[in-house]
Image (cartoon, rainbow, N blue to C red):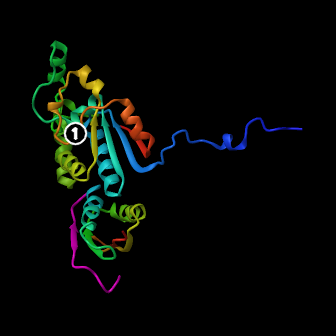
Amino acid sequence: MTSQISPLVMDLKGLLCPMPVVKLAMAIKSIPVGETIEAYATDPGVMADIPAWCRTTGNELVTLEKLEKQFHLVVRRAK
Amino acid sequence: MVTAEFPLENTLTVQSNGKATKNKLSMVVFSGDMDKVMAALIIATGAAASGMEVTMFFTFWGFKAIQKSGGFTGKGLFGRMLGVMNRGGLDAIGPSRLNMGGMGRWMFKLMMKQKGASSLHDLYQMAVELGVKMMPCQMTMDVMEIDPKFFQDNVTPPVGVATFLEEATESKVTLFI
């Protein structure tokens, strides 16, 4: 986790495939390159899909962790 | 002594199309079943969200997915019969199995809602927002007597197989659903 986290925190809780990835892809366009976006989700599919999406798009996966009842993720916009 | 019959560079040439392959997905949506249309829309939105250019080519029963709800298609007797038996629109389509005269559709919709899965309408809207290109097949429109006015506003003018093949040859991923 980096010290600088942009204030944008997304609530992806309750959403199922493909919405967490789609919403994240739409939101990341609104932040400048190099900034990060943080999100919380409940779909267990994000554990596989967010890293896959990052590999496809070239964005950097900063954090992906399973919390007690949700998943926490931070992605840095690469381009 | 063995001599090569063909120049080596010829034997290594595998690409017939000079176009560079784009980061693109081309899909034929042939099926008009709720579950298969759902799969098509999920893949399309996911691909668009992953930075791919996406083209969906709708033909035959797939038309139901791009038709507006309500309204009867058809001009002649058979065309009108087809319009009545084969209602279009995302609300009218049922799952490929266990539809049981609409019961299955109702049950699936309810279960999807309970689990928080996106409805077909949400997925379709998202695909439009993400710039997914949707093209209807001209030949099927003629055969089934379906006028372009029955299609959603984002649908492109009708195209033929050559247009789809042009899209497909420059795509990394092609699917038939």
Q: Quadrant of the N terminus of chain B?
A: top right
* Residue in the picture at 41% in, 35% down: B165
Task: Look at the numbered disc 1 and give the secondary structure of its residue.
Answer: loop
Per the image, the residue denoted by label 1 is: B155
Residue A67 picture location, percent across and down: 30, 74
Count of numbered badges drawn on the protein: 1
Could you tell me which residue is drawn at 16 percent across and 28 percent down?
A: B87
Which residue type carries mark 1? Answer: Val
* Residue nearer the viewer, A17 or B162: B162
- The picture quadrant where one finds residue B58 is top left
Q: Is residue B65 left or right of residue B84?
A: right
Name of the residue lying farthest toward the bottom: A3
Residue B12: where, in percent of width, then height? 66, 44
Foreground residue among A56 and A17: A56
Position of residue B78 relative to residue B46, above or below, is: above
Query: Residue at point 21% right, 43% down?
Result: B108
Quarter residue B103 falls in: top left
Q: Nearer the viewer, residue B32 or B15?
A: B15
| Circle 1 Cα neighbour tier, 10 Å, few/some/many (<14 / 14–19 / ≥20) | some
Does residue B44 show up magenta in the picture?
no
- Secondary structure mostly taken by the magenta-highlighted segment of the chain: loop
Q: What stretch of residues is rendered in magenta?
A: A1-16
